[in-house]
Amino acid sequence: MSRSLDTARSPWATQDGLRAGVLVGSGAAACLVAWAAASGRAAVADQTGFVSLGVAGFLVAFAGEVSWVLRGRRAVGRRAVLLLGGPPQARSGWAAPRADELVAGAGLRLYHRADCRLAGSAWAADGRAGHEAAGRRPCGVCRP
Amino acid sequence: MSLGRWLQTQWDRVVAVGLVAAGIVALVCGWFGISHTPYPAEQLPYILSAGIGGLLLVSIGATSWLSADLRDEWRKLDAIDDTLHELVGSPLVDLDALLPQPERQASEASV
């Protein structure tokens, strides 16, 4: 039976394996070279460069492993979304306030659109200039 | 399930455990080697071979284990895909609701 969404037998493509193999292989080779070269020297000063080479080799190999795992996770996630659907969407019942009427409560520091969720139903309306003359600033939620 | 069959199906996890164990052994051997010489010039090769090599083995083992988990997830998705494919066309499934338009057309073409 053919599969409908993805026919690959594994999460990784051939180039993913090649990339990871080259990185891990070259990193491991660098570690081996560093060890072999450092072992034949009697002075620490002559060895420190090879220690750097060994650490760099480890980091290269580790980058190859991380790349492999991330590629696999991405492929599995993409296929799961195709098969099972994406994560649940946020409910969109909230509508952004759009009213032009600007209201504020007595003694409060912010003025709001009349349909802002933070606005009181019995607050007095005024113009923008009036609110700002009273020292009020626009609400950060409804952004009048 | 027999041991042979289990090893066959869980080869990646067996490799992972083997690599992590080898890495830990290398780290312990490196620690013993370093602790038995007072000269830094004799200690650095242990750090390079047993230290960095051990860490490399542990990290490759961990990667192998994570790969095994991803393969398991992939196989589960295979099973779900097969089941969905068998249900396509039956009155139990509304294909329009299951797939977005491009995937639906591709699916219909492959049936």
Image: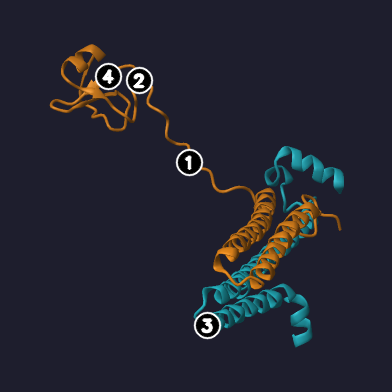
Chain colours: A orange, B cyan
Label drawn at residue A99: 2
| Co-location on one chain, circles 3 and 4 | no
Query: Which element carries disc 3, helix, strand or loop?
Result: loop
Residue type, numbered disc 1: Arg
Residue type, numbered disc 3: Thr
Query: Which element carries disc 1, helix, strand or loop?
Result: loop
| Residue wearing tag 3 | B37
| Residue wearing tag 4 | A102
Between disc 4 and disc 1, whose residue precedes? 1
Viewport quadrant of the N terminus of chain A = bottom right
| Co-location on one chain, circles 2 and 1 | yes
> Which residue is rendered at x = 32% and y = 21% of the image?
A144
Q: Are marks 1 and 3 in contact (CB under 8 Å)?
A: no
Measure how far apart labels 2 and 4 are at the Cα level. 8 Å
Q: Could you say where residue A56 lies in the image, as x and y percent from the top left?
A: 61, 58
> Which residue is rendered at x = 63% and y = 73% of the image?
B49
Measure how far apart labels 2 and 3 are at the Cα level. 80 Å
Measure how far apart labels 4 and 1 are at the Cα level. 27 Å
Between marks 1 and 3 in the image, the one whose residue lies nearer the viewer: 3
| Residue wearing tag 1 | A91
Between marks 3 and 4 in the image, the one whose residue lies nearer the viewer: 3
Image quadrant in which you'd find residue B28: bottom right
Q: Could you say where residue B3 lies in the image, as x and y percent from the top left?
A: 75, 87
| Co-location on one chain, circles 2 and 3 | no
| Co-location on one chain, circles 2 and 4 | yes
Between marks 2 and 3 in the image, the one whose residue lies nearer the viewer: 3
